[in-house]
Amino acid sequence: MNKKSIIAVFAVALLVANNISAQKLSAEDIIAKHLAAIGTAEKRAEVKTLIAAGASEFEASSPVVKGGGKAIVVSDPNNLFFLISLNSKEYPFEKVGYFNGKVDLPFINSGKRSLLGTFLAEHSKVLSDGLFGGVLSHRWSLAEKELPKLSAAGSKKIDDRKAYAIEYLSSDLGTDFTVRLYFDAETFHHVRSEYRREVVPNSPRVGRQNQITNSELTLTESFSEFKSVDGLTLPHRYSVTFASNSNTSVMENTWRILVQKYIVNQALAPDFFTFDIK
């Protein structure tokens, strides 16, 4: 066997070994490593409230719209206050709230919700289960002692880096709705959440088969630029993208937050968690 053949055999053996190693990681193993990547158990237990503040951006593909302003995300184990200002008369803000066991998604104007607000209103388990916002929020459900039902789902390239996939299982989500969470294979940071719903028409009308096909709604949260903050490793770039894809139209809207400052354990007023003007 020549040198080239030996190298080829070694490469194949290494690939097989890596695949076997990946298969041995259960969903619970991945989550345990993920939590350790955030911070020690002692440091995580010390956190009572978490505030992320910074700049916001908004971008829509059809029609083309761009805007931005300020953003703040405030959370404790039971509440989430998510607010983005957009400096637009037609779309002044995006508000996402979960307060004391109730979803709160205010209309943006004239009794209308944004695509993000509509998606979350129709799939409220994403909020009530503490998934939305990922580790940007202290409600992050995977930090709970009693984990939901999870299943390892292989791996995928995220921004040219290998990431382990976990499927989040819940009978309340419906058979046409799937949730997959992705964790960097080296750092175990939570880098993406994908919420996907396939919409199947009940019955096509005669002569309109070409206009009525399956469509797909996807909400994708992405997290990057992880940095240390008071002993915790947290993302400083966040985006959430809503995409609707069918044979008649393609639509995509993206909201971004550039976190400029985290505040850990800020004392909050007892009635802080509400969108009502006091």
Image: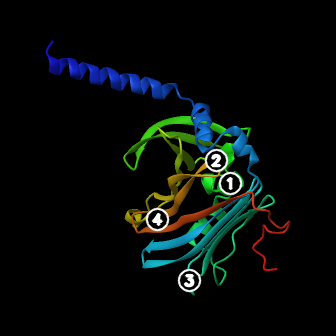
Determine whether the residue tagged by mark 1 lies in a helix, strand or loop: helix
Tag 2 or tag 4, which sits nearer the N-term? 4
Q: CA distance from mark 4 to mark 2?
A: 59 Å
The picture quadrant where one finds residue 270 is bottom right
14 with respect to 5 (left or right): right
Identify the residue at image location x=53%, y=40%: 188
Q: CA distance from mark 3 to mark 2?
A: 34 Å
Identify the residue at image location x=64%, y=83%: 109
The residue singled out by tag 4 in the image is 205
Tag 2 or tag 3, which sits nearer the N-term? 3
Q: Amino acid at mark 4?
A: Arg
Q: Position of residue 134 (x, y in %)?
A: 61, 53
Camera-near label (4 vs 2) is 2
- The reply to whether discs 2 and 1 touch (Cβ–Cβ < 8 Å) is no
- The reply to whether discs 1 and 4 touch (Cβ–Cβ < 8 Å) is no
185 with respect to 179 (left or right): left
- The reply to whether discs 4 and 2 touch (Cβ–Cβ < 8 Å) is no
Identify the residue at image location x=63%, y=40%: 35
Outermost left residue = 2
Point out the image quarter for the C terminus: bottom right
Outermost top residue = 1
Determine whether the residue tagged by mark 3 lies in a helix, strand or loop: loop
Camera-near label (4 vs 3) is 3
Q: Position of residue 86 (x, y in %)?
A: 56, 78
Inspect this view and state whether residue 171 appears. Answer: no
Q: Amino acid at mark 3?
A: Asn
Point out the image quarter for the N terminus: top left
Q: Does 99 appear above or below 147?
A: below
Outermost front residue = 230
The residue singled out by tag 2 in the image is 231
Q: Amino acid at mark 2?
A: Gly
